[in-house]
Structure formats: structure tokens, C-alpha cells
Image (tube, coloured by chain):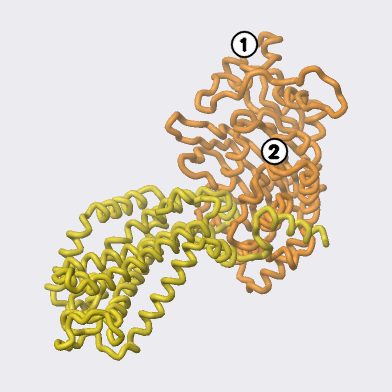
């Protein structure tokens, strides 16, 4: 073994890191060691798979079939039927599409707005930070439920053609606009710490501009908490959309969402419990999987808890 | 003209000429006068050792030259003439052009100075990306050569390594490679070997000396270790409480140190093989940079002042004056008031 090879092998034993292993493969290896996270990942993948195959169902989620209403679960209707005779399983799967897409859209919006805002505030500090933080604080101070209900109502009344046809997008946009400040705050906090690291100073000493430093030095080293937070954000968004729809302010029937299905299930909860059990179970499974995955990611990305204080 | 010619030629125009530099830090507890009137001069190809205790302002001086001082610090006054330009008059964009290009700086902890999520090759290539237009492939090839130049074995392999896969010594070599990737005129090395063990220290200092000879790069070698200075530097400037208190060639400084502080420093070095009951120390501590004494800053600790009962030391601050060509001291013992 050359001295070089020996040095690398010694280093491997100390850091547990195989030579030339990229951060990605290292993170994946650590993630795999978490049974909860792996279980969550498997469940989520299965759910996602089922949801994507929703269109294979022989039933239409929105067409009524009154003579078949309130059927308990059976071979033909594994989840039973609802008050209008529609197959519940199909509706639940289509509802999953709505929930998941809202979740992903909200996450995307929070990242697109939150990362640049947090990065600028965290990197430059000074008046930029002050202004941005006040905006963030103001938005966070709003009572979110009230605002969501209000905004939802306004947008619907405003009769924008965009809104009418794309209910899901509206809700996602509104949820996203209320959620980005949390991400921005997190990004800012992480940036404040990473900014003081010596390699940032060293990069500056080599002539790197502010943009380059943010891009190459700070951002890649801040991804840990950001990824964890975004994952959990999907969960929150799904819960909020469900909550809103449950209250009757979110996405309206006949478009199925788990939330509005829970709403309609309220009336006959005791007689026809399956109407609530299945949508509720789906929400539960998805959220808990996301949370376990978030936990696993948290440990996989930051095993030495360097940036742990910023974790949501 | 090679670097060795420059050393003996007193009429060579200095590469770096720092005049009356003052950098203050405005903190909640008061104004810290980290650099309080520093005059420094580095000739092309020369290795200047900047020596002093922790907190005397050496790093602050280096950062001021690089214009990397940030709030709450500010360069208050002075000229930093590099080549023919006053660095203080340049815009940030112009400074970014110079940094890593004609002036570079390396820091004390080599492994912390490298980005942990990028390979060594990525980081080296980035220097080329920032300052040149060359293609990525060519940048990587040059990087392999740079690694070879700084003595990293098996550079084609090591270039794909991450910083944590390298030892301290190797990481510092990589930093040096990054600093000297382009035609650097001046390398500022801030305690480059302090975090390394002694054998590696010797190798790194050797490397710096060799690179200086090869590339005619001037070096400001900041350290608190007089041994490092004795071995590597051509000229030495001794700093105390934000000021240069003595400046001379290395031979001259060790042969005939003039300032009591310098003398104290040299005497306090334990000599291998010597038996002593107690180590020599300089009594007292460095002054608070917020609340500096009125006269000479070293006066409260100066034995000679006590021995000779000098009162002027407490009253007025001496200037840095030449006692012989090339040997300057800031001390009333060698000046008349």
C-alpha cells in the first residue's frame, strides 16, 4: 500500500467515510440506517404509486350513482361508496393527487421565494436584513386561518378566470405565500452561521464575489436544515389544505380532496364510518411518513449536529 | 532582477508600501485600535516576517492590506501602495480582481479553509474560473500540475479528494496551491504552520521558500514563533499593541535586538539542551487596545525603563526611527526627545 493509500484508509476508519464518496451517497448511506425513515419512504412511495395509478380505476370520481350510495366496503368498492354513490377508493386516490400536488407546489413556492430572501437577509445583514425581516415578521404575525379564508373568498369573488378553473393552484399559491417566511427565516439563520466559516473568508481572499460565495460556499453547506424543513413543509401544507377543505373554505366539491371528504363524512359519521376512516387514514399515513423521512434526513445530513439548532 | 538581488538593493521600489495604517474596531466596549500607525514595506520576492503576540494586530494588518476588514472594523487612515496603486482607492470589484490573483492570503487552519462539500479539484478550478477565461478541462490539468508543484503525491488521484480526506499538511499545501495558482506577486501567510506539527511545519516553510525562489513571489509571513522567522524570513517586523516596534533584517535582529520587547522575546525562547530553573518571561500583559497607555505602549512592562528611571517613556510615544540603515526601532533609548 502506498503511503497515500494508507493515509486514506486510516482516514476512512476515523470518519466512516469511504474515499471519494460524494456527499449524496454518504447521506443516503446514513439515511438507510434509520428503520423509521426507510419505512416512511416505502409507505410514501407506495402511496404515491397508487395515487399515480388513480386513472386506471374503472370508476369516475365525480359521477354520481345514486342507487349505490353509502355502500360499505366490498369487493367491488374496496373503500365503499359515498353519499352520491361514487367509489370512495377512486375518490381517495384522486384526492391524493390534489393533496400531494398542493404539498409539492407549496414547497416549491416557499423555496423559490424563501431561499433568495433568506440568503440576502442572512448574507448582507444591515438594512436589507432589517427590511426583509420586518416583512417576514409581519406575514408571520397574520392569523393564518383567517387570512386563508379571507384570501380564498376574495380570490373567488374577484372572478378571475384563472382562479375559477384552477382552484388547486389558488389554494397552493395562498398557502405558499403564507408559508415562505418560515423558510426564509430558517435560511437566514443558517446563512448567518455558515457566513462566518473560515472557508468563506478564504474564498473571499481568493477574489470570489458575493454572488459566487453565496452560490458555491454558503448555499451548498446550508442544504441540510433547508432540505429537512422543506420535507416537513410538504406535510404542513397537506394538513393545512385538508383543514381548509374540511372547514369548507378550501377546494370545493365535486373535486375530491381528503379534507373535503372528511367534511362530508361528518354528517353520517356513526352510520357510515368508512367515509371518514379512509381519507383520514390516508392523511395520517402520508403525514407520518413525511415526518419519519424528515427525521431520517435530519440525521443523515447532519450527524454531528453542526447546524442542528436550526432544525424545525 | 531576481529576488535575491532585490534583498541587497536598497533602491528597489517596494512591491508593497504600507504607510501610517490605522484600523479600528468599533465595539460595544469601546474602540479597539487594532492597527495604530503601521508602516511596512515588502520588496519584490522578499520574505517579511511579521512577528508578535496574539492580539497585537498582525492578522488585522494582513486583513487590512487585503481589504477584508468588515464591520465593526474600519480602515481609518493610511496608504496601502501595491505596485503603483493605493489599494484603498480601489473599488470592491477591483479588489476582487486582485485577490487570489496578484495578492493572496492563506490562513491558519487549513482544513477549515477548504469548502467541505467540494473536492480539492473543484476548489482549485474555481480560482481559475474566477480570474481567467480558460476552459474547465484546462483548469483541471493546471490544477493537477499545481498539486504536483506543492508536493502532493499522486496528484491525479488526490485531486478528487474531499478536504476531510487530507491531513493538515496536505490541506495547507492545497491552500498554497490555490493561493499561487496565478501569477501572484504577494502571498500573505497568516500563521500557516501554527496548527501543524513541527515536522510538517518544516516542510511547509521549505515549500514557501522554494516557491518564492521559483516564482519570485514576495511573502508576508505572520507568526508568533521566532524560530519560524529565523529560519525563513529575510527581514522581520516586530509588532506590539498595534504598532511596529522594530524592523530589521533577520540576521541583524537576532544579532543585535534593540527594543526591550524584542530582547525579551528572544530571551524567552527555551534553548534545546539548556538547563534552567525558570523560563525567562516578560512580566505583565499586553495593554488593552481600547485603553492604551499614554506614552510608549511597552513602558509598563519595560525593565530598562525601570533600571534607568526614564520618565519620558510614560509621557510620550516614540516614533519608529532608523538607528542604522535597514534597522528601525520605536524606543526612547535610541532617540532624543
Disc 2, SS? strand
Considering only order in the chain, which callout, 1 or 2, is on the residue closer to the N terminus? 2
Q: Residue at x 18, y 80 (%)?
A: A70
On-image quarter of the C terminus of chain A: bottom left
Q: Is residue A205 above or below residue B50?
A: below
Disc 1, SS? loop
Q: Identify the residue position indicated by label 1 in the image.
A: B311
**Chain containing the residue with disc 2:** B
Q: Is residue A89 left or right of residue B78?
A: left
Crowd band around label 2 with a 10 angstrom C-alpha radius: few (<14), some (14–19), many (20+)? many
**Chain containing the residue with disc 1:** B
Q: Is residue A86 above or below residue B215?
A: below
The reply to whether the C-beta atoms of the residues labelled 2 and 1 are less than 8 Å apart is no
Can marks 2 and 1 be said to lie on one chain? yes
Q: Residue at x 72, y 45 (%)?
A: B43
The hue of chain B in the figure is orange
Q: Residue at x 41, y 56 (%)?
A: A187
Residue B58 at what x, y percent from top left?
A: 63, 37
Quadrant of the rendered image containing residue B153: bottom right
Quadrant of the rendered image containing residue B197: top right
The hue of chain A in the figure is yellow
Q: Residue at x 70, y 64 (%)?
A: B159
Q: Identify the residue position indicated by label 2 in the image.
A: B223
The answer to whether any part of residue B220 appears in the image is: no
Residue B95 at what x, y percent from top left?
A: 55, 54
Residue B21 at what x, y percent from top left?
A: 57, 37
Residue extending farthest to the bottom is: A58
Q: Is residue A1 left or right of residue B28?
A: right
Nearest to the observer: residue B125 or residue A158: A158
Amino acid at each position: 500500500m502506498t503511503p497515500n493509500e494508507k493515509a486514506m484508509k486510516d482516514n476512512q476508519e476515523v470518519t466512516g467515510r469511504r474515499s471519494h464518496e460524494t456527499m449524496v451517497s454518504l447521506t443516503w448511506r446514513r439515511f438507510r440506517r434509520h428503520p423509521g425513515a426507510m419505512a416512511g419512504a416505502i409507505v410514501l412511495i407506495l402511496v404515491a404509486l397508487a395515487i399515480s395509478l388513480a386513472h386506471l380505476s374503472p370508476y369516475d370520481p365525480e359521477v354520481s350513482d345514486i342507487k349505490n350510495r353509502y355502500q360499505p366496503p366490498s369487493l367491488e368498492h374496496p373503500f365503499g361508496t359515498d353519499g352520491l354513490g361514487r367509489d370512495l377508493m377512486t375518490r381517495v386516490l384522486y384526492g391524493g393527487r390534489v393533496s400531494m400536488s398542493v404539498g409539492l407546489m407549496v414547497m416549491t413556492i416557499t423555496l423559490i421565494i424563501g431561499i433568495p430572501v433568506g440568503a440576502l437577509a442572512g448574507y448582507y445583514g444591515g438594512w436589507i436584513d432589517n427590511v426583509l425581516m420586518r416583512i417576514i415578521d409581519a406575514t408571520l404575525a397574520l392569523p393564518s386561518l383567517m387570512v386563508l379564508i379571507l384570501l380564498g373568498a376574495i380570490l373567488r369573488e374577484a372572478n378571475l378566470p384563472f382562479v375559477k378553473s384552477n382552484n388547486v393552484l389558488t389554494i397552493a399559491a395562498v398557502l405558499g405565500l403564507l408559508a415562505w417566511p418560515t423558510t426564509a427565516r430558517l435560511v437566514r439563520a443558517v446563512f448567518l452561521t455558515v457566513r462566518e466559516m473560515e472557508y468563506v473568508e478564504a474564498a473571499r481572499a481568493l477574489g470570489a464575489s458575493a454572488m459566487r460565495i453565496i452560490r458555491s460556499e454558503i448555499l451548498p453547506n446550508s442544504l441540510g436544515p433547508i432540505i429537512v424543513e422543506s420535507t416537513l413543509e410538504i406535510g404542513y401544507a397537506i394538513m393545512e389544505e385538508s383543514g381548509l377543505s374540511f372547514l369548507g373554505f378550501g377546494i370545493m366539491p365535486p373535486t375530491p380532496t381528503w379534507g373535503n371528504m372528511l367534511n362530508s363524512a361528518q354528517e353520517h359519521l356513526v352510520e357510515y364510518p368508512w367515509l371518514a376512516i379512509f381519507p383520514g387514514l390516508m392523511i395520517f399515513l402520508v403525514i407520518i411518513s413525511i415526518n419519519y423521512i424528515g427525521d431520517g434526513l435530519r440525521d443523515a445530513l447532519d450527524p454531528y449536529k453542526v447546524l442542528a439548532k436550526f432544525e424545525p | 532582477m531576481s529576488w535575491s538581488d532585490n534583498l541587497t538593493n536598497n533602491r528597489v521600489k517596494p512591491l508593497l508600501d504600507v504607510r501610517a495604517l490605522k484600523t479600528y474596531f468599533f465595539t460595544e466596549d469601546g474602540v479597539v485600535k487594532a492597527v495604530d500607525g503601521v508602516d511596512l514595506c515588502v520588496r519584490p520576492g522578499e520574505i517579511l516576517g511579521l512577528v508578535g503576540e496574539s492580539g497585537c494586530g498582525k492578522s488585522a494588518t494582513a486583513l487590512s492590506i487585503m481589504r477584508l476588514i468588515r464591520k465593526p472594523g474600519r480602515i481609518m487612515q493610511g496608504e496601502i501602495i501595491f505596485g503603483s496603486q493605493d489599494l484603498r482607492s480601489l473599488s470592491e470589484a477591483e479588489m476582487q480582481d486582485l485577490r487570489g490573483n496578484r495578492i493572496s492570503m492563506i490562513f491558519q487552519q487549513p482544513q477549515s479553509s477548504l469548502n467541505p462539500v467540494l473536492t480539492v479539484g473543484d476548489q482549485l478550478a474555481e480560482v481559475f474560473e474566477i480570474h481567467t477565461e480558460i476552459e474547465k478541462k484546462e483548469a483541471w490539468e493546471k490544477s493537477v500540475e499545481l498539486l504536483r508543484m506543492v508536493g502532493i503525491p499522486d496528484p491525479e488521484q488526490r485531486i478528487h479528494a474531499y478536504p476531510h480526506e487530507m491531513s493538515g499538511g496536505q490541506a495547507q499545501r492545497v491552500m498554497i496551491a490555490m493561493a499561487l495558482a496565478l501569477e501572484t506577486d504577494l502571498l500573505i501567510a497568516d500563521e500557516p504552520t501554527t496548527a501543524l506539527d513541527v515536522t510538517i511545519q518544516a516542510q511547509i516553510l521549505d515549500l514557501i521558500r522554494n516557491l518564492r525562489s521559483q516564482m519570485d513571489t514576495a511573502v508576508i509571513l505572520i507568526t508568533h514563533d521566532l524560530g519560524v522567522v529565523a529560519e525563513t524570513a529575510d527581514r522581520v517586523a516586530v509588532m506590539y499593541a498595534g504598532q511596529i516596534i522594530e524592523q530589521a533584517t533577520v540576521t541583524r535582529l537576532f544579532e543585535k535586538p534593540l527594543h526591550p520587547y524584542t530582547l525579551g522575546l528572544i530571551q524567552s525562547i527555551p534553548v534545546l539542551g539548556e538547563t534552567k530553573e525558570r523560563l525567562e518571561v516578560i512580566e505583565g500583559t499586553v495593554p488593552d487596545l481600547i485603553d492604551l497607555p499614554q506614552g510608549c505602549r511597552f513602558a509598563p512592562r519595560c525593565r530598562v525603563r525601570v533600571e534607568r528611571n526614564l520618565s519620558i517613556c510614560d509621557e510620550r510615544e516614540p516614533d519608529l526611527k532608523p538607528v542604522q540603515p535597514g534597522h528601525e526601532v520605536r524606543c526612547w533609548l535610541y532617540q532624543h526627545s
